[in-house]
């Protein structure tokens, strides 16, 4: 039977529009990323209170790594700051902090900081924030396929899903994209098989708690059929 959706367990956000937010204000793109990080800090708190169990934030795609060095440096500085000043506090409050993606391609100190913080993430957290950093679905799927080949034997959907970065994370029920583009840009392609998609024109730094509520409300109005009638 088709089910009316209540609260999503895992909400993914493609946080797009930081650059355009800055451009509109005649500011450098880095100012848009700074404003985006301020939003992340608030949204994590808000999502946690709202009762969702996972918030999966697309912070850097594999393709984003080819952006100008200067912009990347600014983003790495923000990662340093987040994992130094905010993530440890969350862990102290029993919030899970996880990263999916290949952080080994980041500057060594950033990768090191992220993995040290995430290694302390509680395993029984009622709420977890998952950062997708140097994440791309295609790279994730190819990586899993290589693991499967090394292991040998028959692959099933279930066994394959266990080889993805998201092995023990539930599939996203709702994926929000801010910034007006109607595409997934290599985000959770396998996991999004039955996700509800929500596209907002609001640029990420302006995507406030009210906007988040609006998306959750829209989700609750959707009927998820999962191929059934
Ligand atoms: C999203 O904002 C953040 C990252 C990709 C890191 P953009 O930087 O893509 O902002 P726009 O799309 O240029 O406005
Ligand atoms: C998607 O935004 C990646 C993140 C939000 C981290 P992009 O700005 O990179 O996506 P495209 O290039 O418009 O598809
Ligand atoms: Mg963009």
Image (cartoon, rainbow, N blue to C red):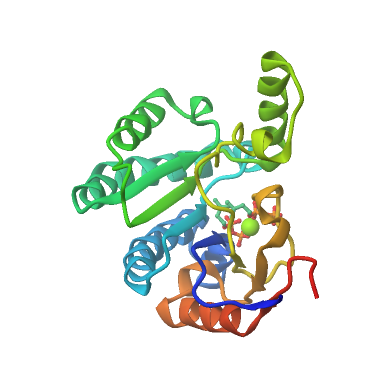
Image quadrant holding the C terminus, namely: bottom right
Q: What residue is shown at x 41% (from left), y 23% (from top)?
A: 108
Q: What residue is shown at x 50% (from left), y 55% (from top)?
A: 57
In the shown orientation, is residue 214 left or right of residue 121? Answer: right
Q: Nearer the viewer, residue 198 or 67?
A: 198
Residue 193, quarter of picture: bottom right
Image: 61 above or below 8: above
Image: 108 above or below 211: above
In the shown orientation, is residue 94 left or right of residue 53? Answer: left
Image quadrant holding the N terminus, namely: bottom right
At which x and y percent is residue 114? 36, 35
At which x and y percent is residue 34? 40, 57
Residue 210, quarter of picture: bottom left
Q: Nearer the viewer, residue 98 or 76?
A: 98
Q: Nearer the viewer, residue 219 or 99?
A: 219
Q: What residue is shown at x 51% (from left), y 65% (from top)?
A: 22
The total of numbered circles placed on residues is: 0
In the shown orientation, is residue 193 left or right of residue 132? Answer: right
At which x and y percent is residue 191? 65, 50
At which x and y percent is residue 26? 52, 68
Indicate which quadrant contains ligand 1: bottom right
């Amino acid at each position: 039977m088709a089910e009316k959706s209540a609260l999503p367990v895992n909400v993914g956000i493609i946080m797009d529009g930081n650059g355009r937010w800055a451009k509109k204000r005649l500011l450098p793109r880095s100012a848009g990323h700074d404003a985006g990080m301020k939003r992340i800090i608030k949204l994590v708190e808000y999502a946690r209170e709202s009762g969702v169990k996972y918030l999966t934030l697309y912070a850097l795609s594999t393709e984003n790594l080819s952006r100008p060095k200067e912009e990347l440096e600014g983003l790495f500085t923000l990662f340093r700051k987040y994992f130094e000043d905010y993530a440890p506090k969350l862990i102290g409050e029993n919030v899970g902090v996880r990263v999916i993606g290949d952080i080994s391609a980041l500057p060594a100190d950033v990768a090191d900081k992220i993995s040290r913080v995430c290694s302390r993430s509680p395993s029984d957290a009622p709420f977890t924030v998952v950062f997708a950093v140097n994440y791309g679905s295609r790279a994730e799927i190819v990586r899993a396929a290589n693991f499967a080949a090394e292991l040998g034997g028959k692959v099933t959907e279930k066994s394959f899903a266990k080889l993805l970065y998201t092995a023990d994370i539930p599939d996203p029920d709702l994926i929000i994209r801010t910034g007006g583009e109607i595409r997934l840009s290599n985000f959770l392609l396998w996991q999004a098989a039955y996700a509800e998609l929500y596209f907002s024109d609001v640029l990420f730094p302006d995507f406030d708690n009210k906007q988040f509520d609006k998306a959750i409300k829209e989700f609750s109005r959707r009927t998820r059929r999962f191929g059934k009638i």
